[in-house]
Amino acid sequence: MIKYKELELIYSSFKCDKNCPYCTAKITKWPIKDDSLDNLEKKLQLLKDKNIKFKYFIMSGNGEPSLNSYESLEKIKNAINKINLFDEKRLQSSGNIFYEDDKFNLLKDDFMIEITRCYFDSKKDMDILGYNRDYINTDNFSKANIRLNYVMLKDKSFDDYLNEIQMFIDKYPNIKTVSLKTLNLNTFDGNIDNPYSQWIINNGLTKADSDKIIEYMSNNAKFKCKDEKFFDRYEWLYKGIPITFYVKKLDYGYSNIVYYGGELVDYHLNPIVLKNDNM
Ligand code: SF4
């Protein structure tokens, strides 16, 4: 059996209700495609036949996944429950999902919902990430299992990061895991030819800061495990909550497969070449 980290389904629509200054979708500008969700079950079966499993299924988008139709979300849910190759399923959301009761109720029991924050303070977070609804204080938010992606910006110290993470965990007991995020300059072709990548260079931590992050966290939180061979991951525990950091020393998406436009591809949109020597 071969175990990959993620199967990431990326919707093609660029619709989003946020305006993040580091937007990966706007950096990589993947071509718009028909999502061809009817192919999903067939592709999952192909992976199953090759004895491949995944730690995570991630529903994501070049925009906000929950702005797609209820029917399409249901189609995805049914396919991955029918051919379940995953330890855990996640939906990456701008926060919009918490305002759409039908879609939220469809997915909340099966999916961990991933939110991304730069600040504990909602007003500051809304200002920097360009959104205007404070989703973290909705009823639906409190009913979800949450993964917090915490983006590290240069205007704070490592002590500040850890303090803010502690505040999140103390205030929202439904946060089950935290992921420390550095920002990707351009995962498609590496070019810094756009304002979003430039913003990251000026304001964010990138994979060049990995060693500093590992050193600080190893001195200040309880170390749990380290796996650089395939999953490229460090994990610490803080008040029992895992804090994960993907080091990104391997090629971006090394242990991931992407479902995009009905095909299995890598992050350069090349047809996937399956690995067979990773476990
Ligand atoms: S939530 Fe995602 S798709 Fe929307 S603007 Fe932010 S980075 Fe881009």
Image (cartoon, grey):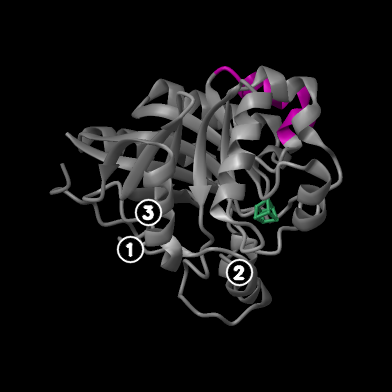
Q: Amino acid at mark 2?
A: Ile
Residue drawn 24% across and 49% down?
A: 230
Closer to the camera in the image, 69 or 144: 144
| Residue 147 within the magenta-colored segment of the rendering | no
Q: Nearer the viewer, residue 16 or 20?
A: 20
How far apart, in angstroms, are the residues tagged by discs 2 and 3? 22 Å
| Numbered circle sitting on residue 251 | 1
Magenta residues?
97-109
Element assignment for label 3: helix
- Residues at circles 2 and 1 in contact by the CB criterion of under 8 Å: no
Give the mark nearer the N terminus: 2 vs 3: 2
Which residue lies under the disc numbered 2? 200
Q: Give the crowd class for mark 1: few <14, some 14-19, many >=20 residues within 10 Å.
A: few
Identify the residue at image location x=34%, y=44%. 234
* Most common SS among magenta residues: helix
Neighbour tally class for label 2: few under 14, some 14-19, many 20 plus, Cα within 10 Å: many
Q: CA distance from mark 1 to mark 3?
A: 22 Å
**Looking at numbered disc 1 in the image, what kind of residue is underneath it?**
Asp
Q: Is there CB contact under 8 Å for labels 2 and 3?
A: no
Residue closer to the observer: 20 or 218: 218
- Is any atom of residue 42 visible in this view? no
Q: Amino acid at mark 3?
A: Glu
Q: Nearer the viewer, mark 1 or mark 3?
A: 3
Q: Earlier in the sequence, mark 2 or mark 1?
A: 2
Callout 1 secondary element: loop
State yes or no: Cβ of the residue under disc 2 lies below 8 Å from any atom of ligand 1: no
**Mark 1–mark 3 CB contact (< 8 Å):** no
Mark 3 C-beta closer than 8 Å to ligand 1: no
Query: In the image, residue 18 lies at what x, y percent?
Result: 76, 52
**Residue 215 - label:** 3
- Residue 73 location (% of width, % of height): 61, 32
